[in-house]
Structure formats: structure tokens, C-alpha cells
Amino acid sequence: MATNETELEIVRRAYAKQIVAAVATHDPRIEAAFSELHREDFLGPGPWQLMRFPAGYFSTPSDDPVYLYQDVAVGMIPSQGLNNGQPSFLAFLISIGRAQEGEHAVHIGAGVGYYTAVIARLVGNTGTVTAIEYEPDLAKRAAINLGAYPTVSVVVGDGSTTPIDPADVIYVNAGATRPAETWLNALKNGGRLILPLTTSFTTDDGHSMTRGAIFLIERREGDYLARWMSPTAIYPCSGARDEASEQALAAGFKKGGWEKVTRLYRAADIPEERCWVRTDAWSLAYH
């Protein structure tokens, strides 16, 4: 027997509390968004493919939406290893972006729009959200799913090169090897960039994936403050990966010290001893 809507409301409230407790966020708006949004409306009809690492995908017993209210990734294109990500991890990324009422937020790698909807609720009716998705089918689904949000614009394209208006917060929901010039240029003074910097690997079932670290980049006039926030394993960002940056990141992860990073420089002339990662175009430095 399927769970009725009254019971689902209770389940969603419990799910939202567990999600925000897992990431220790004190923003009640995030809990409210996860409590009120219907994940099944974004993921389409079930049964659904849930991802549990390292075992892989397994199907829910039925199309009862109650199975979606777990802290688990759900397959959007399982054949590519492309998922609607783990809710607690996305709640963490959203929380460190500190999106406020009236701001312009950019969500790169929007998928089917579930987490974009959370962001849209944070910026409110006076704010705007630009959602960029590389996969055309997912972008089409996101546009439909987000149709009730007039403040959200869905764009299909490469998130590293698609032009974006000046932004207060940019969420990159895919693994990059470098900060794209587009993102840094678009950040307003005081703007925040949630940036996964990662190296590539192949999963046991043959999917391309990346792993590395989440950095919070904050623009202060001409400076960019940088801070390590967490480790990550995340789907690759197609346009924001290059071999030279990946090699530099791999060397940085091997030597350690990422937690000491305090600055991002858009330059190559920073002394080596000050840098965790240095490339011909950008550097992450200790001071």
C-alpha cells in the first residue's frame, strides 16, 4: 500500500531534519525547503535506482515516493553514473554558499532541478537563479520541473563557458580541475564560489568520476580568499578540466596541506614555496 500524502509530509519533515543535522547547518530556510519540496516531482515516476557506495545501484521495491526520503543519491542517468546527489552533501554545499534573499545565484550542473529549487527558495521572490545543465535531456526536465519558479532561468550548455550575469553566489555541482575565468569574472564583490577541485578516476563499473576537495572562494575587491571545506567525490565538469591543472592538483593532493590554503591567485608568478597548487594561469596559496 502506497504511503499517503499526510504520511509523506511527516516523512519529509523527518528527512529534512536529518539532512540539516548531518551538515550542522543552522539555517532554518534550508530545512524548510527540504521539508516542503517533493523529490519525486523532480525525479519522475518510480521505481527509482538508488546509489549506495560501493555496492552500486539498486531498485526501490515500488514507486512509493517514501523510498526517496533517505540520505541517498538517486540515478538520473545510471548508465553514465549521473545522479541526483546525496542530500546531506548538497545541503552542505548550499549552506556554505550563504545565499540570501534578493541575490543572484548560479547553479552549474543543475541536473533535474531539485537542488536548484532549494537555492531558489533561499534567494526568494526578489532574487534570481540561473541554472546551467550540460546534458540536454536533463536541462529539458529541469525547465519543466522548475516551471513554477519564475525567478529561475534554465540554460542548456557548458557551465564553464556559458556567459552569466554578475553573481552573488555560484555553485559548481561537478568536479573541475581549475576555476573557470567565467566564474571568477562573474563574482560580485563579496560573492562566493563553491568550487570542487578534483582529479579523475574510473569507478569499478566503468563510470568516469572525480575526487578531491571543495573550496570556498570569496571575492574581496581584486582578491580571492580561499578555504578548504570538505573532501568530495563528484561527477566531472566537462568544460572545466585540463591536463596541466589536473597534474598540478594531483601533486598538491599527494603532498597535502590543502587545509592551509587561504588565497586564490589569477597569476602564475606566485613563489612556489607559498603555493599548494601553482599552474601557468592560477594558483592556490597559503598566504
Image (cartoon, grey):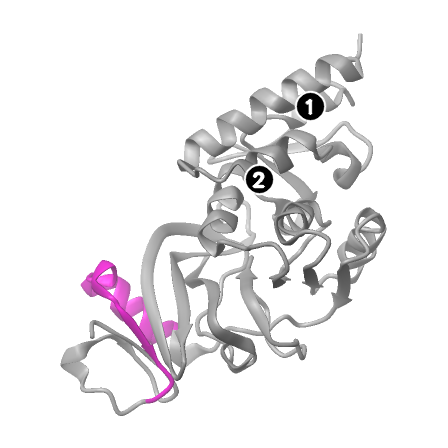
Front residue of this view, candidates 221 and 254: 221
178 or 23, which is in the foreground? Answer: 23
* Near-viewer residue (10 or 234): 10
Residue 59 visible to the viewer: no
Q: Find residue 26 and report its horizontal and vertical position in percent.
A: 44, 37
Segment tinted magenta in the rendering: 246-267
Residue at the spot x=64%, y=18% of the render?
11
Nearest the camera: 98 or 146? 98
- Mark toward the start of the polypeptide (2 vs 1): 2
What percent of the width, then of the height, locates residue 30?
56, 39
Query: x, y (%) of residue 93?
Result: 48, 50
264 magenta-colored: yes
On screen, residue 58 versus residue 249, left or right, reads: right
The kind of residue tagged 2 is: Arg
102 on left or right of 287: right
Residue at x 71% of width, y 50% of height: 113
Neighbourhood count class around disc 1 (C-alpha, 10 Å): few under 14, some 14–19, many 20 upward: some
* Callout 2: SS: helix
* On screen, residue 159 above or below 15: below
Above/below status of 164 relative to 212 = below
Residue 83 in percent (x, y) is at: 63, 45
Location of mark 1 (residue) = 60
Callout 1 secondary element: loop
In percent of the image, x 64 and y 24: which residue is there?
12
Quarter of the picture containing the N terminus is: top right
Residue in the image at 66% along x and 76% along y: 164
Describe residue 214's horizontal placement relative to residue 138 as left or right. left
Label 2: how many Cα within 10 Å (few below 14, some 14–19, many 20+): some
Q: Which residue is mark 2?
A: 29
